[in-house]
Image (cartoon, helix red, strand yellow):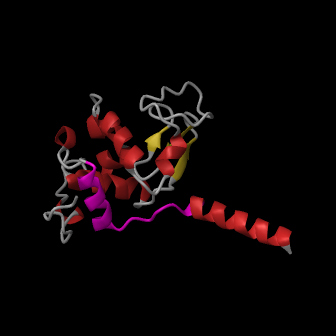
């Protein structure tokens, strides 16, 4: 019986980690604003929310493997292991954010935002995110924050 409890408890821990946080649109917009993404490097908050939706469906635990270069995208903004983080699996990883990719899967998006700021500071800007290029760039993105209470003091 004791062994069954430990196994069951271990499975719960794994399932809790694997599921991540599923953000609601306005909740993510609020957190991204708090972390300083609104206007960062000239990209408005709706750009970031749109990118997160098309990259991960607002899920912090999203992981996607890229067979073309054997890299993996991690977290709510699908930050790539070839260039930005270290997952100890990707050949020739640059790890420009100097971070373990697992940190990008946290319910707390602090590390994801820090790394995203590093990504967007490169000459490519938000063009680094294919989903942003295909779904958000040059579009009216006002609906991504419409109805969200973002004007009051968030801190």
Answer left or right for 117 relative to 66: left
Q: Does the rendering let one see residue 126?
A: yes
Q: Quadrant of the N terminus?
A: bottom right
Q: Is residue 74 visible?
A: no
Along the line of sight, which residue is nearer the eye, 29 or 140? 29
What percent of the width, then of the height, locates residue 42? 16, 41
* Residue bounds of the magenta highlight: 18-35
Please, is residue 65 above or below residue 140 in the view?
A: above
Q: Residue at x 39, y 65 (%)?
A: 23
Residue at image location 21% in from the left, 61% down from the top? 154
Q: Residue at x 36, y 49 (%)?
A: 131
Q: Quadrant of the C terminus?
A: bottom left
- Position of 19 with respect to 28 (left or right) is right
* Image spot of residue 58 (x, y percent): 40, 60
How many numbered badges does the structure rendering display? Answer: 0
Extreme residue toward the bottom, this view: 1
Task: Please say if 54 is above or below 5.
Answer: above
In the image, is 3 to the left or to the right of 102?
Answer: right
Task: State the predominant SS element of the stretch in magenta.
Answer: helix
Examine the structure image and report whether residue 99 is included in the region drawn in magenta: no
Q: Nearer the viewer, residue 81 or 19?
A: 19
User: Which residue is the extreme one toward the left?
Assistant: 151
Nearer to the camera, 62 or 105: 105
Q: Is residue 33 magenta?
A: yes
- Residue 115 is situated, as x and y percent measured from the top left of the image, at 38, 39
């Amino acid at each position: 019986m004791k062994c069954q409890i430990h196994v069951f408890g271990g499975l719960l821990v794994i399932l809790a980690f694997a599921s991540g946080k599923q953000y609601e649109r306005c909740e993510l917009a609020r957190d991204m604003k708090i972390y300083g993404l609104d206007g960062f490097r000239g990209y408005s908050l709706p750009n970031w929310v749109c990118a997160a939706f098309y990259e991960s469906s607002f899920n912090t635990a999203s992981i996607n493997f890229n067979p073309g270069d054997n890299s993996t995208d991690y977290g709510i903004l699908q930050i790539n292991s070839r260039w930005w983080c270290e997952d100890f699996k990707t050949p020739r990883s640059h790890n420009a954010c100097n971070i373990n990719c697992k940190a990008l899967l946290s319910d707390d998006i602090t590390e994801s935002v820090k790394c995203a700021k590093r990504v967007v500071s490169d000459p490519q800007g938000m063009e680094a995110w294919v989903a942003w290029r295909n779904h958000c760039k040059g579009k009216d993105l006002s609906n991504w924050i419409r109805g969200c209470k973002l004007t009051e003091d968030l801190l």
